[in-house]
Image (tube, rainbow, N blue to C red):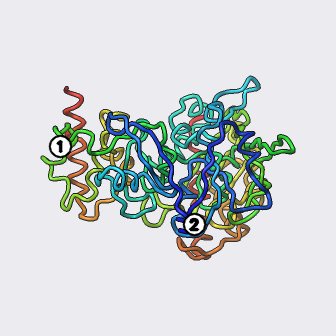
Amino acid sequence: MKDVMTQTIDFTLNGKAVSAEIQGHWTLVDLLQQGFDLYGARQSCGQGLCGCCTVVLNGKPVSGCLFLAALADGATIETIENNEETLDPVQEAFIEAGAFQCGFCTPGFVLMTRQLIAEIPEPSEEEIRLYLTGNLCRCGTYPQIIEAVQKAAARMRAA
Amino acid sequence: MNAFELALPDTLAGAVSLLDPEDPTIRVMSGGTALMLMMKTDVFHPTQLISLRRIEPGYSQMGLLPDGSFRIGAMSTLSDMEHDDALAGFAPVIRQTMKLLSNVRVRNVATVGGALAHGDPHMDLPPVLVALDAQVVTISPEGERTIPVAELHAGYYETILSGNELIKEVIIPPQHARRASYLKCTTRAVKDWPALGVALTTDLDGDTARDTRLVIGAVGEKPIRVAEAEAVIDGQILSDKTIAEAADAAAESVETIEDELGSAAYKTQLVRVYVKRALQQVANQNA
């Protein structure tokens, strides 16, 4: 880095209007970690393949490691820290099913599962596997994750 | 990543005016999923990035045109294309292709214009659009021009676009009762880059195939249209014998190149197997 260019962006983060001074090359992961001490979105593969950096941008999940922070000016961003006080049905179902071991991938899986159930309220196992192909769990808890997604979907349909 | 300037023009014409055909370090960024990978791995060091995120919203919309063709604005994301019901009715093969293309997050950001301009031979969409006989309309200081997608790619990560020419929209001609299929082979996981992609469209007049377009992706420097196999198919009923002959013709004529997803010999065998499967699939589709 020869010269560091900074700029200020304004956006909505987990329901609150915020602004941040960023460096031009920052990704959304850099923005959340360095600007706001939020570590739920974390870089793992750095290539958009693993889903650990999942962030919901303007209502759609994106890979935070492949998205420039500067382009989030004016955007609405939600992270796993959105509901710190309570657990939602997806988080409850992940805990009940034991759908994680180390937990590193879990924020990404939870955010993607919320979107999956919003799009497909009654997903089949195949639909779940296809929707979550871009999320990797290196502990291998996929059977429990599928169980958790189905459990959460059933509960949200009943609610 | 290195330090770069970021420009956010409000119009596509404005974006074109910022480009310098003599300076490849000034580049347009559409969704940016591919370009970010090149920047993060130090393959590409821009001095200036021109983001298209703020250009006119018309370039991220799509719909039927009065002449019956379908227009897709170049900034439409792959998710937009996947979820557009009119497009799914017009060319169902596009939604089928999207389901297995990379993953939801990439599809939410990557755009059709970027996928075409990037020129990566492993992308799924370019061979499908060649098989659908699509065209792109481009804009540059010299004005607009229309280019068949079949002629857009010049080689590995190369297009015939000049350094200050941008894709503004994709036009797919009416498909009428044409049947289409896209099959791919991934060697590690379903969302992986394909070791091979086969895109096929054909008219089945009665049982006789006409105007077949067979395009192979991910085995060479760019999508490859296989005239030798099309010639075997056109005018014939799609019998087991014709299908086997066409698959052999494709395997013999397509020059495959080894990459990290498979050797040249392996890819030749994939061509044979997957051309056969694609032809069987269209033969068995309900008209």
Mark 1 Cα-neighbour bin, 10 Å: few <14, some 14–19, many ≥20: many
* Callout 1 secondary element: helix
Mark pair 2, 1: CA separation: 42 Å
Q: Which one is in front in this view, the residue at disc 2 or the one at disc 1?
A: 1
User: 10 Å neighbourhood of mark 2: few (<14), some, or many (≥20)?
Assistant: many
Q: Chain of mark 2?
A: B
Amino acid under label 2? Answer: Leu
Query: Taking A2 as reference, is B26 left or right?
Result: right
The three-letter amino acid code for the residue at tag 1 is Ala
Q: Which mark is residue A18?
A: none
Residue B209 in view (yes/no)? no
Residue at (75, 45) in percent of width and height: B16
Residue identified by numbered label 2: B270
Q: Are marks 2 and 1 on the same chain?
A: no
Left/right of residue B200 with respect to residue B190 in the rendered view: right
**Residue at the right extreme, as displayed:** B142
Residue A70 seen in the current view: yes
